Amino acid sequence: MSAAQAEHWYLRKLSNETARRTRVFDTLAANDSVRFGYVTEFIHEFLGFEIVLVSLLEKSTVYLKAPIGLNVECVAVENSLCLHVMNNNDITVFEDLKQLPEVTKGMLSSMRERVRFYAGFPFWSANNLFIGSVCVMNSQPHQLSQREYRTLSQLARLVEFDIAHSLIPRESEQTSLAFSFKRLNRITDIARDLNLNVTLIRVTFAHPGAEISSMEALSQRIRPWDTLTRLSDKAVLLTLQHRASHVDIADICQRVFAFNSASAGLLQVEAETFNASSIAHIQTMLLALKPQPLTGLLT
């Protein structure tokens, strides 16, 4: 292959990759089904990084999804540290950017003054196409612990998993539930590694109804790092990243489902808290749920 042919091949490769990223980006924008906020809020809450975001590459722009600690929606790729993650095509860590002027020279001045530590954990689409990264930053130098490294890697894989699922054409309820269980298993694996408690609450209604017709609206009533999963047209599952007493469960159910004395359609509430050592496959944990007395759940 001549130099001219090699250059032509390389330019075609870049063009094809850009077109494929655009298709992914457009699909994500159209269905808005990936909860990037779950990942950034989880990292901020349980790992404590000052700045957290998910970056998505689209042509010459990096879009910052669900950012915490940073009020920026997008940045030119040449001004983004995500560029280094893309070029490395691997996890990229800068423990002290003040010691790396060759890295910081392209950064926005406002970011250069604020950020000393940066870590980017990439995720890919089909055929190993780089599409973005889970990014964490601090104002002081930092060295990732094994726990942080492992958790951030797992969360990047969760984003990758969610994006891959969002690109699949509309599916059956059974297939959707199978995906939800796979996703919950990933979430509970992360909780176990972080030594967190997990509380599962299954709420079942006697008949299909408006109580669970809008999962998006219901999801707005729980904490960002908790999860709401539709099990059927009559049942939903709440997955909480903490231990919950009966009083807590009653409060959560009332807040999420607006239970009241007219909630005659409520059939059963089952719950159980699992510590890190007892976390298992999600379907195994569902078998361990215990009925909760309805007294106190209805007001």
Image: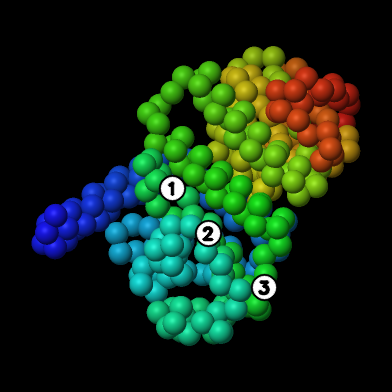
- Of the numbered discs 1 and 3, the one sitting upstream in the chain is 1
Identify the residue under disc 2: 91
Quadrant (top left, top right, bottom left, bottom right) of the N terminus: bottom left
Q: Is residue 295 visible?
A: yes
* Mark 1 and mark 2 residues within 8 Å of each other at the beta carbon: no
Q: Nearer the viewer, mark 1 or mark 2?
A: 2
The residue nearer to you, when weighing 88 against 195, is 88
- Residue drawn 74% across and 46% down? 193
Query: The residue tagged with tag 3: helix, strand or loop?
Result: loop
Point out residue 268 in the picture as x, y percentages from the top left corner.
78, 20
Q: Amino acid at mark 1?
A: Trp
Circle 1 is placed at which residue position?
A: 124
Q: Which mark is residue 115?
A: none
Element class at badge 1: strand
Q: Is residue 1 above or below residue 173?
A: below
- Seen at 62% across and 54% down, the residue is 152
Q: Which residue is mark 3?
A: 142
Spot occupied by residue 18 in the image (x, y as percentages of width and height) = 27, 53
Q: Residues within 10 Å of mark 2 (few under 14, many from 20)?
A: some
Residue drawn at point x = 76 percent, y = 42 percent? 192
Rendered image coloring scheme? rainbow
Query: What element does badge 2 sit on?
Result: loop
Q: CA distance from mark 1 to mark 2?
A: 12 Å
Extreme-top residue of the structure? 206
Q: CA distance from mark 3 to mark 2?
A: 15 Å
Amino acid carrying label 2: it is Ile
Q: Position of residue 198 (x, y in %)?
A: 78, 39
Q: The disc labelled 3 sits on which kind of residue?
A: His
Q: Is residue 45 visible?
A: no
